[in-house]
Amino acid sequence: MTFTGPMVETLVSPAADAQRQLATDDGAIDGLDQVHGSVQTALHSYDTDAGSRTRALQDGWAGGAADRQAADAATMTTAARDIGTYSAEVQGAVREAAGILKVGQSTNQQLIDNFMDRAAQLLSTAAALRQAGDHAGAQAKIGELIRLGAQVSGESSTNLEAVMNQLTGVVTRLDSAEGGSTAPAAAQPSAPPSAYTSGGGGGGGGGGGGGDYGGGGGGGVATKKRLPMAIPPQPGSGVAVNLPDGSTVMAPNETAAKAVRAALGQLGVPYVWGGTSPGVGLDCSGLTQYAYGEGGLDIPRTSREQDIGAEVPSADQLLPGDLICWEGHVAMYIGNGQMVEAGDPVQVGPLRTTNAGMPFVGFYRPTG
């Protein structure tokens, strides 16, 4: 049994998935803050103007009609103030929830970073022991790594639960505050507002230097970015690429063709967690980043960030150079139902959409 980076990816994937769940949509949060600030400013202006108009009318108007107008104005002013108060409470809740999520992110990221550092040490020691012929000692280190992975998963789950409980408390207080106001009942939230957490599949997980742990989990449905659909190339267009089996396929453009050739040029290179050294050691996203770099296109470092360009809607529309993305792994399609990936070592295999229980994200064409 070979103990390498893919094992670490699987062990850290629950914590990485938690990190993605804790990601905040800062743009939406800022937008809500500005909207509620504008609402409160407008209502304050209305309150001031209404008071001035009422006083002016009272100075020159008397009788039953004047009394009814004054009562109506008072009712409207009270309603405006109630709405303004509720708006301020919502604004405060959004800010508080964002702060809770930020603390949760920081705590979870520290768990991931500590695990990755310790995992690297354990894998290195295990490799040295195997090299020395001490297979029992190597097995013991791998057992320690597995136990560490379970511990980190548990601690990450506890942190995530604590964050969710705090968010529930924020919403409960907001519901209670609303119950005492004249704000419309239909506006009552029953769950944390969607702007608290990101709804696009932006990379949320541990994005330190080289680890491919920016998301993932034990199966399930992955959250996707909203990207345009890839446009099929014109018939007869494309760039020829020769595959190791002697066949020839057509990449959609020169960039993709160069990326496929570069990736295939790394066949046999060992898997190294966080590896970005062609010919020496590569991890899954290190391989694809290097390959597209050779094609003249810079793509993000981690696997969870490489779902870029345009989405390919189905496997039968894949073209050489397209990326196959999971939450924690990435491979490159090379044509003829095959893909190249940084296993141990870099190798060609049949196209698949399963990978150690990780949620499958989709197919992507970095060149659009």
Image (cartoon, rainbow, N blue to C red):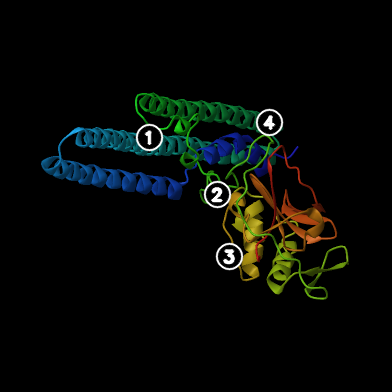
Q: Residue furthest left?
A: 59
- Tell me which numbered mark, 4 or 1, is placed earlier along the sequence: 1
Local SS, label 2 = loop
Q: CA distance from mark 3 to mark 2?
A: 18 Å
Amino acid at dot 4: Gln
Q: Residues within 10 Å of mark 4 (few under 14, many from 20)?
A: some
The residue that mark 4 highlights is 139
Which of 198/132 is in front?
198
Quadrant assignment, res 44: top left
Q: Which residue is mark 2?
A: 202
| Residue 133 percent across, percent down from the top left | 71, 37
Observer-side mark, 4 or 1, equals 1
Tag of residue 93? 1
Residue 298 bears which disc, if any? 3
Q: Nearer the viewer, mark 1 or mark 3?
A: 1
Looking at the image, tell me whether mark 4 or mark 2 is earlier in sequence order.
Answer: 4
Q: CA distance from mark 3 to mark 4?
A: 39 Å
Front tag of 2 and 1: 1
Image point (39%, 38%), residue name = 94
Distance from Cα at disc 2 to Cα at disc 1? 23 Å
State the SS at label 3.
Answer: loop
Depth check, front residue: 49 or 311: 49
Mark earlier in primary sequence (1, 3)? 1
Residue 280 visible in the displayed image: no
